[in-house]
Amino acid sequence: MSLEAMDFTPGTGQKGTLGRLLRYMLPYRKKVLASLVILLLATATDVFQPILIKIFIDGYLIPRHFPQKAMILLGGGYMLLVLLTAGFNVAQLLLFQVLALDIIQNLRVELFDKVQTLSLAFFDRTPVGVLVSRLTNDTEAILEMFMTVLSTFVQNITVLVGILIAMFALDARLAAYCLVLMPVTALIMMLYRKVTSPVFHMARQRLSWLNAKLNESLQGMSVIQAMRQEERLRGEFGAINNDYRRVRFRNMQLNALLLRPLMDGIYLLALMLILWYFGERSFSHLVNIGVLYAFVTYLSRFFEPVNSMLQRLNFFQQAMVSSERVFQILDNPDTAPQQEGTDHPVIHEGRVCFEDVSFSYDGRTDVLKHISFTAMPGQTVAIVGHTGSGKSSTVNLLMRFYPVERGRITIDGTDLRHFSDHELRRKIGLVLQDPFLFVGDVTSNIRLGNTFVSDSEVVGAARFVQADGFIEALDQGYHAPIGERGATLSTGQRQLVSFARTMAMNPSILVLDEATASVDTETEEAIQRALEKMRHGRTTIAIAHRLSTIQDADLILVLHHGEIVEQGTHQQLLAQEGLYYNMFLLQQGSTGLGAN
């Protein structure tokens, strides 16, 4: 599936998105209120500064009268206003930034929690890099909005209101003329948002593609180098990168046209209007130079917040697009199957029963068709078949990674859907062909956050699966560090650690998904001996690639195109000389077959 198909479509629109973002501020009402109060004080002290200059010009400079006490009061008052304005601005900016960090911290946790609940089907069709981009780049853009855009808009709108009030106090008629600037400014902002919104959507989308391609390349570096695919990957990455550059350049062009140059032109026209107005009045009325100075100063200060807001529109648009992308994940209904009902059944014996189960990933093509079998406690049921026959899908349904929509799976006679996730994960142990180890040490990977598993039980589980030999040979033993995905260990060692992890939970049901397929012969023999002990008293369902590993299974199911075409013990299936017989013949050869 292409990256274009993987990306999500735009969501609810910027108005609804902004309202939803602002609701994240509700738990921080006190901080918001304190910030607004300090902001009002900063605005008042800032707006009042030109008034003092106006008083000085009209009351003292033009009459050339400079009493010492008045000069000290005006000068000291002006300096005090400047210092108070700076102090209030620092305080409110700090409060807004702390508020932004708190909000984004909670949003990231909420987003990460949501990702944990999404179904495996969602991850099947979504590149990891796209999700990483949502969790990092998009939330960082939202943080930028709360830190700079929101505080800037609130501050500058408050300043604009204060400036207009001061203008009306000085000259109501001229202030009324200046009000025309408000709808013009709002129109420019609306035009900017409308024109740039699609560009920002494309930019964030291309950035997600970059992350997805980068993640894929880093994870598959060994294959890329072994198959000499560096040139191809370099070309693909370069094409996406060039596309991203093209979209960002388009954004820069729009910014250059719609932001500062346009507002500078409007500012010059407004300045010409003020000078014309006072020049016209000077022929018939006395013009106060202080009032003229105050108006010109206010006009300059009027356009400073307007320009600041227009510059921040760039970040605002990015944040809105990023917010839509984040909310699309938070609102995604494709969650993992959940417990149905209010009862809390418990798994005691571990009897597993598939009753006429059929399943499809896409809703069109069935990968499982009318699967029925029973695995009794203490029994081992092996599932074999060619690639694509439905072996792993059977395990995925038992683990409730995907919902059972047709047929029924029961454990101890209770429908699988009625068990809690905690009970299922606690009582069903899963070992995969490619074990996943986390960054940490050996002990933390065996315990896996289960605090009820003691250190002695960790050691006991490792000894049980015969992993203690290589663990104790490590430099730091059970505290030896493990790199990402267990890169510091061999494949067989990683598999043994995953076995120990499973046994530390002491599950009632054991699920082995080709657990020995990547293990060398010597290690496999050790694991097989451990498996013999592990299976006692447990229901074991094993997907097998090597038929030699399941010859002692109580029941072998042979899948072909999603259907059970043969079932029985090893000897019974060989006697049928069907599909199992041919698979065994291919693996063992005629000599091996005759020996059996």
Image (tube, helix red, strand yellow):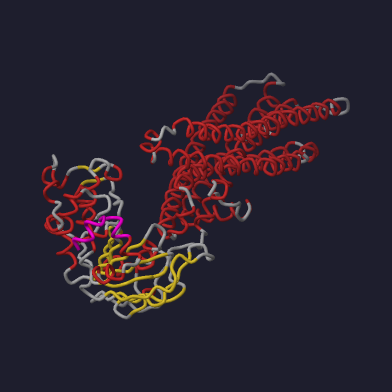
Residue lying farthest to the top in this orientation: 64
Horizontal and vertical percent position of residue 453:
18, 60
Residue lying farthest to the bottom in this orientation: 413
For the C terminus, the quadrant is bottom left
Q: Residue at x 35, y 68 (%)?
A: 398
Q: Is residue 189 left or right of residue 412?
A: right
Foreground residue among 62 and 192: 192
Foreground residue among 451 and 462: 462
Q: Which quadrant of the figure has residue 260?
A: top right
Horizontal and vertical percent position of residue 214:
45, 38
Q: Is residue 589 rendered magenta in the image?
A: yes
Q: Is residue 280 left or right of residue 84?
A: right
Q: Is residue 594 rendered magenta in the image?
A: yes
Q: Residue at x 30, y 64 (%)?
A: 581
Q: Is residue 299 left or right of residue 45?
A: right
- In this rendering, the answer to whether 295 lies above or below 339 is above
Horizontal and vertical percent position of residue 526:
15, 54
Q: Which quadrant of the figure has residue 41?
A: top right
Query: What is the span of residues highlighted in magenta in the rendered image?
Result: 583-596
- In this rendering, the answer to whether 26 lies above or below 493 is below
Q: How many marks?
A: 0
- In this rendering, the answer to whether 418 lies above or below 17 is below
Horizontal and vertical percent position of residue 396:
38, 63
